Amino acid sequence: MNSLAALRYRNFRLLWIGLLVSFTGSMMQNAAVLWQVSLLVAPEHKGLALGVVGLVRVGPIVLLSLVSGVVADVLNRRMLMMVANLVAAIVSLALAILTLRGLFVVWPVYAVTAVGSAVSAFDLPARQALLPMLVSREDLPNALSLNATMMQVASVAGPALTGVLIATTGGVGAIYVVNAISFFFVIGALLAMRDVPEREAATTGKKDEVSLAAALEGLRFVFSAPLIRSTMLLDFFATFFSSAMALLPIFAQDILHVGAQGYGWLYAAPAAGALVMSVFMVPLTERIERRGKVLLWAVIAYGVATVVFGLSRSFWLTFACLAATGATDTVSMVIRNIVRQLETPDRLRGRMSGVNMVFFMGGPQLGEFEAGAVANWFGAPLSVITGGVGCVAATVWIALTTPTLRHYRK
């Protein structure tokens, strides 16, 4: 099987390249926001303040996920992505202007971050639902694996560049400008596409409208499908308990004492591990037979690596543990995405992605708030350790209560 099969489709190739640039900018901004927040608050409140970043990101997603999913199923998905990316560029530019003019309080960072999250709530379901329109059904698993690889490349490059820029310039304003520019690569890719069908040819003739009934139909579908429901729950609980990325400024500044450049590399470590694993996953995805068991063991390994990260006082051991979380999460993510895309009818893909957004983005963002709160009162290491233990326990519970997932095969 050709490991780059999906890239032969021109429209997918254009979007893949555009997203690579855009995701790199977004990863730079995500790391920069945490660093900026850590410097704007008193040391004794640092953990909680970093956790609030996750809270302001997840709030708009929870509020808008059902609406955005229906919108992605009703409107032109490509046009919706173009509008969302244009607004996202404006939001990043606003944050850049505020920062370059001088920020001494943290609340504007929270406010702009929340607006950016609201925009992404409309972009992601449209993007997820558009993807199957760009490649054949047979090449969809390969496209998902290539997307995972692209995201991990961006996740490695973005934070690493952030660490270098912070260390050399002393600020984060330029990073926000770079991210604003990066969104136009996606817009350009979408404009350059040709002959993109709005829906699958085999879809039903039913015409949906933006309504409560349409949103509830998406909810009913997700929670009546055991495989889709269980993968979403697994994603939520695992990332809720094991999300510790918001605490990395504390580890870099106060525990490992590695400064801004060390922070950049630690932030990039999960993506580095994910990148290595995704290179293997591209050719191996179609060969994995016992997908359910592989998925469950990958999440358990993710939790164990998180526990060791919390115990570590060595930069390189911490880096290795974070890389291991990225590698195991990549295995889990690819299998989850294949299940959801293949098992969901096209007319419901936007709504499925909207509901899923609450789980896979809500889990880590709420988890970061939980981790920050625990770190504020009991210390960052204990917060990370207990989170890893909780991840393992939640995975075992889901495995025992969902035999359909345990026995799921190719």
Image (cartoon, grey):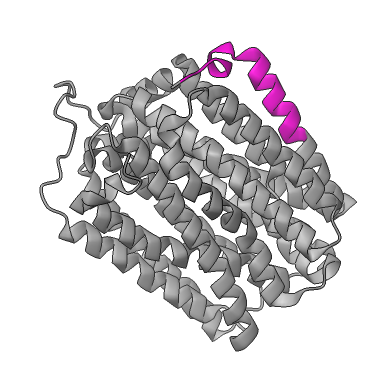
**For residue 366, above or below residue 376:** above
Foreground of the two, 180 or 245: 245
Is residue 183 rendered to the left or right of residue 192? right
- Report the residue at 59% width, 42% height from top: 329
* Residue 183 visible (yes or no): yes
Image quadrant holding the N terminus, namely: top left
- The answer to which quarter of the image holds residue 332 is top right
Find residue 184 and report its horizontal and vertical position in percent.
30, 68
- Report the residue at 64% width, 34% height from top: 299
- Report the residue at 46% width, 65% height from top: 24
Find residue 214 and report its horizontal and vertical position in percent.
31, 25
Image quadrant holding the C terminus, namely: top left
Residue found farthest to the left? 195
Foreground of the two, 349 or 37: 349
Is residue 346 rendered to the left or right of residue 282? left
**For residue 370, above or below residue 392:** below
Residue found farthest to the bottom? 169
- The answer to which quarter of the image holds residue 160 is bottom right
Is residue 261 rendered to the left or right of residue 345? right
Q: Is residue 340 magenta?
A: no
- Report the residue at 23% width, 65% height from top: 188
- The answer to which quarter of the image holds residue 390 is top right
Is residue 353 rendered to the left or right of residue 29? left
**For residue 178, above or below residue 57:** below
Find residue 87 and report its horizontal and vertical position in percent.
34, 62
Residue found farthest to the right? 378
Magenta stretch? Answer: 390-409
Q: Is residue 408 magenta?
A: yes
**For residue 25, above or below residue 226:** below
Find residue 158 and report its horizontal and vertical position in percent.
52, 67
